[in-house]
Image (cartoon, rainbow, N blue to C red):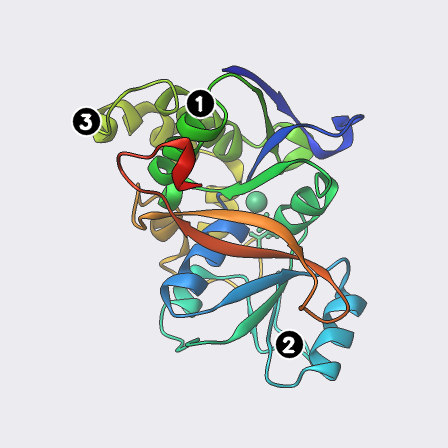
Amino acid sequence: MDTRYLGIAELTEVPSVAVVVDVMRAFTVAAWAFARGAERIVLAESLDDARALKDRHPDWVAIKDGPPAPGFDTVNSPGMLRSMDLSGRTVVQKTTAGTVGALAVKDASLVLCASFVVAEATARLLRARAAHDTVTFVVTGEDGKAEEDLACAQYIALRATEDTSAGAAEQAVPYLRRAAESRAAEELATGVRAGVHPDDVPLCLELDRFPFAMIASWDGDADAGRMTLRPYEVPVQVTTTDL
Ligand SMILES: O=C(O)[C@H](CS(=O)(=O)O)OP(=O)(O)O
Ligand SMILES: [Mg+2]
């Protein structure tokens, strides 16, 4: 597997396989939404688009980053999502980096959205589906320089070359440390960013909290057709016929 690491603005061609990484916080939040029962996450193009989706589908749960705002049900915080019951719900998500990165590679043949909480499942899916491909990791934060996203991307790339899930916790230590010392972690912990729960940073640094990867694909049934994120439970002994 060949790997490359690009910021959103550096995506000049359609990748074959894309792993869009946003540790703090979009794809930690997305994983928590699925853990709390959400059926799918519609990735909104803009705040206006998210509001319009919510207007057309009042039963959908709209999430934005930054401070709470009219028209949105909650904010981009795993600490807040953790206590919500989202059973069977469709979530609409719009954030500054993560959802923008996923939409930027919407024409790729496989789009995974990832963070530390789904790292091993993501790596396992790459082992099965992309062992002979070039995998483009989209480092969504800070114009491709966000240390928490780059560290997570490099960790998933490392794990994707391993045969088993043994040893993951030990291998992860330096990568998690880089994320813990990132600018995003500091800003979330010190109140520079809005719409934050005190547990957000530790929740974003939980390794393999969830057993699923997250695949973004076109869903013709969502509104008039939308890029939509869904969880994908990756069998431990996966073969290509499982997919
Ligand atoms: O909600 C977040 O943590 C960020 C937005 S900001 O950098 O805090 O303004 O969005 P994300 O797309 O999840 O990085
Ligand atoms: Mg981020």
The answer, for residue 191, to whether it is visible in the render is: no
The image quadrant in which ligand 2 is located: top right
Most foreground residue, 116 or 145 = 116
Q: Position of residue 52 (x, y in %)?
A: 78, 75
Q: How many marks?
A: 3
Most foreground residue, 239 or 113 = 239
Taking the spot 27% from the left edge, 23% from the top edge, the residue there is 171
Q: Which residue of the protein is positioned furthest toward the bottom in this rendering? A: 58
Q: Position of residue 126 (x, y in %)?
A: 45, 29
Query: First in sequence: mark 1 or mark 3?
Result: 1
Q: Give residue 14's quadrant in the image.
A: top right
Taking the spot 38% from the left edge, 44% from the top edge, the residue there is 118
In the rendered structure, which amino acid carries the disc numbered 2? Phe
Q: Residues within 10 Å of mark 2 (few under 14, many from 20)?
A: some
Q: Give residue 45's quadrant in the image.
A: bottom right
The residue at which mark 2 appears reads as 72
Q: In whole angstroms, how far apart are the C-alphas of marks 3 and 2?
A: 41 Å
Task: Say what secondary structure mark 2 lies in.
Answer: loop
Q: Disc number at residue 142?
A: none
Which quarter shows the C terminus?
Answer: top left
Q: Position of residue 4 (x, y in %)?
A: 60, 18
Q: Where is 178 relative to 73, above or below?
A: above
Query: First in sequence: mark 2 or mark 1?
Result: 2
The residue at which mark 1 appears reads as 157
The answer, for residue 49, to whether it is visible in the render is: yes
Query: First in sequence: mark 3 or mark 2?
Result: 2
Q: Where is 128 relative to 24, above or below?
A: above
The residue at which mark 3 appears reads as 166
Task: Say what secondary structure mark 1 lies in.
Answer: helix
